[in-house]
Amino acid sequence: MIVRFDGSPRGGLTGILLACVLLTGSVSSQEAQTPVPGFEGADPTQWVMVEDLSDEFDGPGIDPKKWNNNPPDWGPWSWKPENTRIEDGTLRLTIAYEEHEAKRPAPGGILVPMDLYYTSGIVRSWHTLTYGYYEARIKGVPTFPGSSPAFWIYSVDDEMRALGLYGDQEGDVTYAEIDIVELQQAEDIDGDQTRRYPVNVMEMNLHKRVIEEGKEVWKRPNKNPEAQKTKVFADFDPRDDFHTYAARVTEEEIVWYLDGKEVGRKPNTSWHKPFHVTLSLGLRYPHVTYFDCPYSVGRCPVPEEARRDGYPADMEIDYVRVYEPRVDILH
């Protein structure tokens, strides 16, 4: 699915708050400032904020009761707690040039050494939710191409095993991920590695792993775009200002929003696991490749493209707000 978007920042949230004041005529100033879901058509009386998954980032530092900023590493860069901080009322995730060696998993379950060139920042919620409305206000990273801000929710394998939710039968989903937004990826156009999408193109995709013929098989959006891929061509550069990115997840469907306006919708056939809310700043083209990687790892760095120019660089998050439906209203 491909969408072209024309909208303004925070329009949906402001409109809903104003409507509440005009209709009641008796809302106190404190109540009027209470955050509500920012998508068009939202009924704020039907949603309850999940405090354990929400944060205005107005405190002196990252709340350790809400956020894990040192999860296990994956991919051709490393997470560092030092690359996450709160400054001037926003969460800053920093990607930095930093040569180091680390081990990464290769086929067969072995760990192999890898020379890496960047570290970055991530926060992942300690708590989980499945069905709800997830919204964050984000400003992109100045460096492009090379870095990709992301707001996403996903299941953690070890937790799913401990809860008996991992799955072991034919057709079971063992892993589920909803990308609320991935910005500035500079993905190749139709497989042509010499042509790349510009900075205003963003993706809102679905990923899963499924048991087929006794083996776990990845189901990626590029191979199943009708069910798993949404590409949005925005009329703005995400590096210039803050915008709201959101998804509403129900048992039946997943709906994506950009500045309160719907930009994508898919049937929810597989995404029913407890999800961790995650904000991260990943490495992308030209610093990462999927081709000719040593030890047959899935992704690896491109040493000849590693450089200090443009780094360190920050993505900014004004807030993340998560809501669950009142009285189990999941539609």
Image (tube, rainbow, N blue to C red):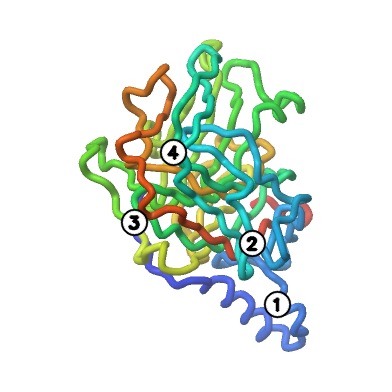
Q: Residues within 10 Å of mark 2 (few under 14, many from 20)?
A: some
Work out whether mark 1 precedes mark 4 in sequence or the reverse, and give the earlier one. Answer: 1
Could you say which is closer to the camera, residue 30 or residue 312? 312
Q: State how far apart marks 4 and 3 are (Cα).
A: 23 Å
Q: Residue 68 location, x and y as percent?
A: 69, 45
Q: Residue 78 location, x and y as percent?
A: 53, 38
Disc nearest the viewer among 4 and 2? 4
Work out whether mark 2 precedes mark 1 in sequence or the reverse, and give the earlier one. Answer: 1
Q: Give the residue at mark 4.
A: 117
The numbered mark at residue 199 is 3
Secondary element at tag 4: strand
Secondary element at tag 2: strand
Horizontally, residue 137 falls left or right of residue 193, namely: right
Q: Give the residue at mark 2.
A: 86
Label 2 is placed on what type of residue?
Ile
Residue sitting at 49 percent across and 63 percent down? 139
Residue sitting at 21 percent across and 41 percent down? 194
Label 4 is placed on what type of residue?
Tyr
Could you say which is closer to the camera, residue 232 or residue 91? 91
Work out whether mark 4 precedes mark 2 in sequence or the reverse, and give the earlier one. Answer: 2
Secondary element at tag 1: loop
Work out whether mark 3 precedes mark 1 in sequence or the reverse, and give the earlier one. Answer: 1
Q: Give the residue at mark 1.
A: 33
Q: State how far apart marks 3 and 1 are (Cα).
A: 33 Å
Residue 255, compared with residue 187, is above or below; it is: below
Horizontally, residue 12 falls left or right of residue 19, namely: left
